Amino acid sequence: MSSLVLEQEVDLRSLLTKVEQRLHEVAVVHSRTVGQLASHVIKAGGKRLRPQLVIFSGWKEKNDWEPVLDVAVAAELLHTASLIHDDIIDHADTRRSLPTINVLQGNQTAVMTGDYLFARALTLLSKESTRDALSFMVESIQAMCEGIIEEIGALFNPTVTEEDYLSRINKKTASLVAACCGAGARVRGASQEEVASYTDFGRNLGICFQIIDDILDFTSDEETLGKPAGSDFSQGILTLPAIYLLEHPDWNKPIREILAKRSCTNDDLFFIKEAAKQTDSIHRSYRKAQEFQEKARECLRFIPISPVWPLLNRLTEMVMIRKR
């Protein structure tokens, strides 16, 4: 999903360049050794969706951008730290087509690198100018931990429901997206009502984003994704397409048999993907993503019109059509 470029009122390209520079500066400021490992992940890039959302929600005319940029950098550091920890849990070998830190340096070093980035993010959020954003981000960290623990507890479990899944991704993914939107608005001094609308927008956008991500794990390939396709199911993580597939009477039994092995061969993955193609599992998942896309758009009705408003609306379209 490509970066958006704002109108003349806000030069997003310039602001994102500053975020990128600060990400590397903050990562290496105290520790060259850990900083180099952190930079390895940061240099892999990414969509930078979370910093963009902080900037969008923190936009106002004649803005002092320093606090907003600090929050934007902190948000991306938190996201990067969570990815490092995810890779350890998932035994992932690659991330964005690069070897993961756990492969390069082992799990212990990877854990400490992730913790280091969490600490650097919280340092930025502890400044007087950014303190109002701290509670948003701390609550999202707590929610992400809960979501990951729930995910681990449900591995290879064929009784996982759509409700379970939505609760998990709300915590694991959408909580941070919501926090980015709420924190940006709060730091610029928005009203409680506007902060709440931005937060709700981010939560619905984040759920939509994750559903599409999980669909792509079924429909895309490793070259496009930058990580092995089908990795969720092979790790026993049941996402929405798999949950819908288990509801199908013709496919429930063979898929349960695969899950009962608590391991997944390439042939098993091929079977699952073909099954998804032959049913409406993928289409149903897209429809569910569209529900949350519409909820996000509904939230925009309560956000004042500004130069960034059309871009927020555009984001709801981009999350649905992205390829990776």
Image (cartoon, rainbow, N blue to C red):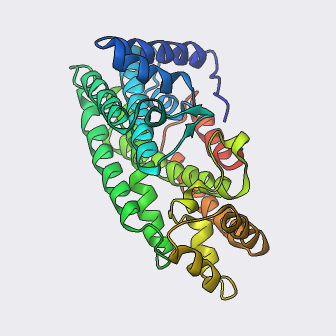
Q: Position of residue 303 (x, y in %)?
A: 48, 41
Of residues 263 and 276, the one nearer the viewer is 263
Q: Residue at x 37, y 56 (%)?
A: 147
In the image, residue 173 sits, relative to residue 276, either above or below, namely: above
Q: Position of residue 129 (x, y in %)?
A: 26, 19
Q: Position of residue 263 (x, y in %)?
A: 54, 66
For residue 247, what is the image quadrant? bottom right
**Residue 9 seen from this side:** no
Of residues 65 and 91, the one nearer the viewer is 91
In the image, residue 248 sits, relative to residue 267, either above or below, namely: below
In the image, residue 268 sits, relative to residue 37, either above or below, namely: below
**Residue 273 seen from this side:** yes
For residue 84, what is the image quadrant? top left
Quadrant of the frame with the N terminus? top right
Q: Residue at x 50, y 69 (%)?
A: 262
Q: Position of residue 286 (x, y in %)?
A: 67, 62
Of residues 279 and 285, the one nearer the viewer is 279
In the image, residue 215 sits, relative to residue 279, either above or below, namely: above
Q: Residue at x 63, y 64 (%)?
A: 265
